[in-house]
């Protein structure tokens, strides 16, 4: 394996490029996690602020104007709006799955078709999330289907 590092001006966005034969290899996943693991979002629970790794987020949801991040066991309120969170997570496995939700594709155990062209995604914590018809193409693209 060849490793090369290129340094450039601070004006450009930092990036990681991976050239591989199998994008599902463990080492590729480790590199992605290391690169994306630096993105942190602040969540609030019982008036305490927590730093949350973006890759630990199962989904981000807006309910009645309130914004929440769901992790394996906990729910945190956040200050970011949906479009801000979407922009923050644009280079990660998180994708828009409905008008009010952004879902982490890496947390999906399996999917099944639902009514009217929608899909149900069953997450590794047992929760079921509906992917609306409008976002099915993005959903398939993020899963590599």
Image (cartoon, grey):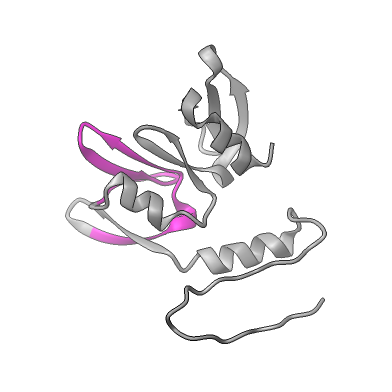
Q: Is residue 128 above or below residue 49?
A: above
Residue 116 falls inside the magenta stretch: no
Q: Position of residue 51 (x, y in %)?
A: 34, 63
Q: Position of residue 114 (x, y in %)?
A: 55, 16
Q: Is residue 144 above or below residue 91?
A: above
Residue 62 visible, this angle = yes
Q: Residue at x 46, y 69 (%)?
A: 38
Q: Residue at x 65, y 84 (%)?
A: 5
Q: Residue at x 19, y 51 (%)?
A: 46
* Residue 144, quarter of picture: top right
Q: Is residue 12 above or below residue 135?
A: below
Query: Looking at the image, which residue sits at the far top?
Result: 115
Question: Is residue 3 found left or right of 138 in the rendered image?
Answer: right
Main SS, magenta residues: strand
Question: Is residue 13 found left or right of 112 in the rendered image?
Answer: left
Q: Quadrant of the C terminus?
A: top right
Residue 131 visible, this angle = no
Q: Residue at x 26, y 42 (%)?
A: 67
Q: Position of residue 44 (x, y in %)?
A: 24, 54
Question: Is residue 79 found left or right of 57 in the rendered image?
Answer: left
Q: Position of residue 79 (x, y in %)?
A: 23, 52
Q: Quadrant of the N terminus?
A: bottom right
* Residue 108, quarter of picture: top right
Which range of residues does the magenta coloring cover?
49-78
* Residue 19, quarter of picture: bottom right
Residue 65 falls inside the magenta stretch: yes
């Amino acid at each position: 394996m060849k490793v090369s590092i290129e340094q450039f001006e601070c004006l450009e966005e930092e990036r990681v490029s991976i050239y591989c034969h199998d994008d599902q290899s463990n080492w590729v996943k480790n590199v992605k996690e290391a690169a994306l693991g630096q993105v942190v979002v602040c969540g609030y629970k019982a008036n305490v602020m927590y730093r949350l790794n973006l890759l630990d987020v199962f989904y981000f949801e807006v309910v009645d104007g309130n914004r929440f991040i769901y992790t394996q066991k906990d729910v945190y309120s956040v200050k970011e709006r949906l479009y801000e969170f979407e922009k923050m997570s644009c280079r990660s496995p998180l994708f828009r799955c409905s008008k009010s939700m952004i879902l982490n594709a890496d947390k999906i155990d399996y999917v099944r078709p639902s009514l009217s062209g929608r899909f149900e995604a069953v997450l590794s914590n047992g929760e079921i999330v509906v992917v609306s018809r409008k976002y099915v193409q993005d959903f398939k693209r993020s899963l590599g289907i």
